[in-house]
Image (cartoon, rainbow, N blue to C red):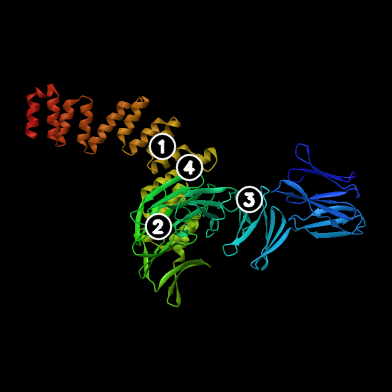
Amino acid sequence: WAAGHLVAAGCDRRITVYDSSGRVVRQFDYGTEREFTVACCSPSGQAVAVGSYDRVRVFSWSPRKASWQEEPPKEIPDLYTVTALAWKRDGSRVACGALCGSVELFESVLKRTVWKDKFEMTYVGPSQVLVKPLQGDARGVILKSQFGHEIDDVRIMGQDRYLVARTPDTLLLGDLQRNLLSEVPWPDTGRLERFYLDNPNVCLIFNAGELSLVEYGTNEILGSVRTEFMNPHLISVRLNERRQLNSSEENKKLAYLLDLKTICIVDLVYGMTLLQVSHDSKIDWLELNETAHKLLYRDKKMRLTLLDCRTGQRHAILSYCTFVQWVTGSDVVVAQSRNNACVWYNIDTPDKVSMFPVRGEIVDVVRSDGKTEILTQDGNHQLGYELDEGLVEFGTAVHDSDFGRAILFLESLGPGVDADGMWQNLADIALQLGNLRVAERCYAALGDMSRTHYLRETLQVAADFAKQHGGDGMDCPEVWARMAVLNKQLKTAEAIYLEQNQLQKALDMYIRLHKWDEAIALAELKGYSGLGELQARHLQWLLDTRQEEKAAELKEKSREYTTALSLYLKADMPARAARLVQSVPELLGNEEVVSRVVAAL
């Protein structure tokens, strides 16, 4: 089988090509030669070698002509009958075995070119090219069109790391270091595209006002948007960087400019716009953090703004900003304002910034060998300022869900404003991931004893449930309800209790939180048998807490006007009492009641 066809040859000295339905497509007749003894197909399926006596014939598939073509035969005198043929997996060589025991090895190359004395490109077939570096020990790559199109142009770009090739109908892109290749449909555009290869995960292709993104290793266009501002500083793409532990959720986001004052953030997984943000000045730089939850952007007035991509909240965090960069592998931000370096170790609290003077202009932030360093250029001198790697490491540990490492670091810091912000950040993340023990430890460090005690009780409920039913206890509905209460999602907690047919627990939850109105409304809705007792408890609680006005309103609704009047007067609200008297004829006709109200007024 080759290129969707069946090639057959034998003692009749004919080579016949059949299509998939069995029809004869082409036939080659060699009546003056000996019979054919063996055949072999190339790995690409676009060439077939057929052996006979002292001769090997090659037939190739031409994608442009859509037909099989005969190539010049290889004559080998005194070889005698060819008994075996085998093609190397990359298609570059053919081994030929003969009846007398000889083995011949031939190159199978259409053409060979050298790119800038750095790479050798060997065309082993119309749709297959071997790209091999001439220097170093790096392995080459096999560039092959998945659609069988003829490759007619191959280039090495992006500091000799990336590969760009063309066929009449597709575009091939590759990362040579990671051996990731992509082929996407691409119409002929006159080769006017511009390729931006700054991002190691995705290639940006700009053509006629349209930006297309291709992820290396994926044979489809990740996304396309319309924009006129094709500048690497005005586009930011993040693809599954710094995933949280045990998370398989795809996280692919793009931030770009709709116009000079409007930022658009797109979810590339679902192809939908998440957020559009307008600014009052022209924007000249933007970048998402590695998790794509935060966006930094700077305008022409050199003001630096932080945007929360999930909530849309904005914070102006710095003026006269000449340099800004996210630290690799963390959510730490480094910026420069005049002669000061500004560092946000915890970007979730943008008002807490560490500042120190530096000489010259910051040119880069480098993180390697266990340390993070700010590099500045002062004339001909380059200076370095080392950051607190412990604080940087904390952010990395949190986002990698390595809570043990994060807690050990915070314990080594001791009490302080910076530490409190990080404890709070760690607590929020732990609650989101359902790690109650870490959250309990964080709230204990913050001195929030009520939350600490509540989480400890919740953990005990989970432990009791696990002892009875197995598992880790986090599947317990009571735990779900308690966590919903902690997150102030009372309706969710109510729904959980009602699903378990635990009306009393739902009522008790509202009562513990002094949400008496919600408790009574739920009791009325469900026809609770103890509704009267519940209303009496509510009234007594109002009186005990000196809320006579609220108690009076309840009595007024239940038509107990005399009691309501007394409570209004006790609450020092004679005006409300007077309105009540005017609206109730029996009170208005009682001279003693009227005189009491008049005296109070």
Q: CA distance from mark 4 to mark 2?
A: 44 Å
Along the polypeptide, which appears first: circle 3 or circle 1?
3
Classify mark 4: residues with Cα within 10 Å, few (<14), some (14-19) or many (20+): many
Q: In the picture provided, is 465 more to the left or to the right than 29?
A: left
Query: Which quadrant holds the N terminus?
Result: top right
Along the polypeptide, which appears first: circle 1 or circle 4?
4
Residue to which mark 3 is pinned? 168
Residue type at mark 3 is Pro
| Residue 400 rendering spot, x and y as whole percentages | 51, 55
**Discs 2, 3 touching: Cβ within 8 Å:** no
- Per the image, label 4 sits on a secondary structure element best described as helix
Foreground mark, 1 or 2, reads: 2
Residue 412 seen from this side: yes
Along the polypeptide, which appears first: circle 1 or circle 2?
2
Residue type at mark 4 is Ala
- Per the image, label 2 sits on a secondary structure element best described as strand
Camera-side residue of 159 and 28 = 28
Q: Is residue 175 above or below residue 467?
A: below
**Mark drawn on residue 462:** 4
- Per the image, label 1 sits on a secondary structure element best described as helix
| Residue 565 rendering spot, x and y as whole percentages | 15, 29
Residue type at mark 2 is Tyr
Classify mark 2: residues with Cα within 10 Å, few (<14), some (14-19) or many (20+): many
Residue to which mark 2 is pinned? 297
Foreground mark, 3 or 4, reads: 3
Residue type at mark 1 is Thr
**Discs 4, 2 touching: Cβ within 8 Å:** no
